[in-house]
Structures are given as structure tokens and as C-alpha cells.
Image (spheres, rainbow, N blue to C red):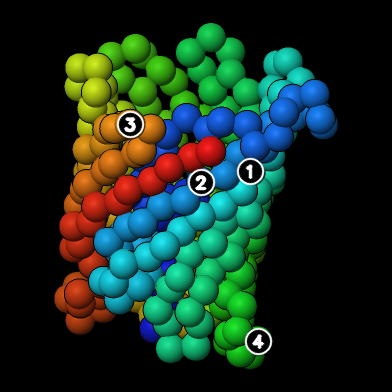
Amino acid sequence: MKKSKFLIVPMIAFGMVSLAKAEPLVEESAIPGEFSANISLTSDYIFRGISQTGNNPAVQGGFDYTYDFGPAAVSAGIWASNVKFSDATIEIDYYAGVGGSIDNFSWDLSAIYYSYPGADSSLNYDFFEIAPSIGYDFGFMAVSAGLNYSPEYFGDSGDAYYTHGGIDIPLGKYFTLSGTVGYQAIDDNAAWGTDDYTDYGISLSTEIAGFGLSAGWTDTDLSKSQCDDACGVFSVALSRSF
């Protein structure tokens, strides 16, 4: 995001991270459901096309819980990353949702709370989003679309929505080519710091010895005066799930 927040959903947006398949942290017989964890090192934390770390590296990680009850599954988790804003150095996201699949069609409805511990409360950095999404796997490629809505966006900038779509294309057995595009609309652009904007990106990812490796480019249609070096960024990421 522009704080005047490389993505996720987390992104959870185009975070330039390809995670290996998670392994349970707790044996299934202990408690219902499955726990997992993830950690990554990225050359830049990009959220919706804009660097959150001033083009510097980020260490990111989180914990997730999933309970599958047949036609669908519920999940919850926490994720954190360093950021570089004038009044905040860390972002912690909390999320929960429900999702499922029918044949090749998938759906998800999640809620996300973005928090910035240490920032002055008067800055109103913390915000909440609801995020429904759908997807379809054609085999030779998978597509997805979603809408994130916030009743009061970052910096007390009013209601905002982010519409986004993505495509993943397997390249043989080992690589995946991914593309994303999104549109961020904000009620109070002056409080946010830029006009409404479109972001887009492309990345290539693979898995080596249980580690996810990705590299890609992301940019926006914001002018240089509004985004400067925070937009138009190439980044690489190394990740691992447990």
C-alpha cells in the first residue's frame, strides 16, 4: 500500500511468493484440523503494485489453521512483514474465511484485518476488508477473480474497493507463469495520497527441494510524481512452508 502498503493477501495481492505445500505442524490425532506455517524472504514487499519497504528486502511469515468439513473448509491465520513507513515498521494481518470447490470451480469468502503496531492511533493506519473470490481450473491454465472491500481504508481515506484477476499457466512440470491485474478505487484520494489506479504484474515461479522460488515485475499506471520508485519494481522471493 502507499503509505505517504510487493501484495498480498495477503495478499494476498501480488506478493511475489510461491509457497511449497504445507505440512501439518500438529498430528491430526491431537486436535481437529491442520496447522501450518510459512516463511519467506523477498527483495521487496509489494502490495497492489506499490512497495511497502522502500525497495528494501522483507522477511515475512505466518501461521494458518484449516478445518475441512467436507464440501468446504474454514480457515484462520496471522501473517506479518516488516514495512518502511514514517510511523510504522511492521504490519500484522489477521484473517479468517470459508471456501470450497466443486469440480474445477473454487470459491472463498474471507475477512482481513491489517494492523500496524507502533503507529500513532491518530494516523488511522489499521483497516478491515471483506474479500470474496472465485476461481476455475481449466487444466492448461487457472483463472481467478475477486473483490476486496473496506468500509474505512488505510489512513481514514473512506470506503474503498479493489477488484482483481489472475491467471496461472503451467510451463511443463516445474514452472508456473502468473499474471495479475487489479484496480484500486478509494473514496478520499487526498487522504490516501494518490488517484485511483490500476496495478499489474507478471511472475515466474518454481519449487526446488521444498522451497518456493519466484521472480517477477509489477507496476501501476500512477504517474512518477505520485508513486516514484515505489512503482515499477522487479523482485525475487524464496519461501518455505511447514
The mark nearer the N terminus, 3 or 4, is 4
Image height of 158 relative to 190, above or below: above
Q: Which residue is mark 4?
A: 121
The mark nearer the N terminus, 4 or 1, is 1
Q: CA distance from mark 2 to mark 3?
A: 15 Å
The mark nearer the N terminus, 2 or 4, is 2
Within 10 Å of the Cα at label 1, are there few (<14), some (14-19), or many (20+) other Cα atoms? some
93 displayed left or right of 202: right
Residue 209 badge: 3
Between residues 81 and 148, which one lies in front from this camera angle? 81
Residue 64 badge: 1
Q: Amino acid at mark 1?
A: Asp
Badge 1 element: strand
The mark nearer the N terminus, 1 or 3, is 1
Residue 196 appears in the figure: no
Q: Position of residue 82 (x, y in %)?
A: 45, 70
Within 10 Å of the Cα at label 2, are there few (<14), some (14-19), or many (20+) other Cα atoms? some
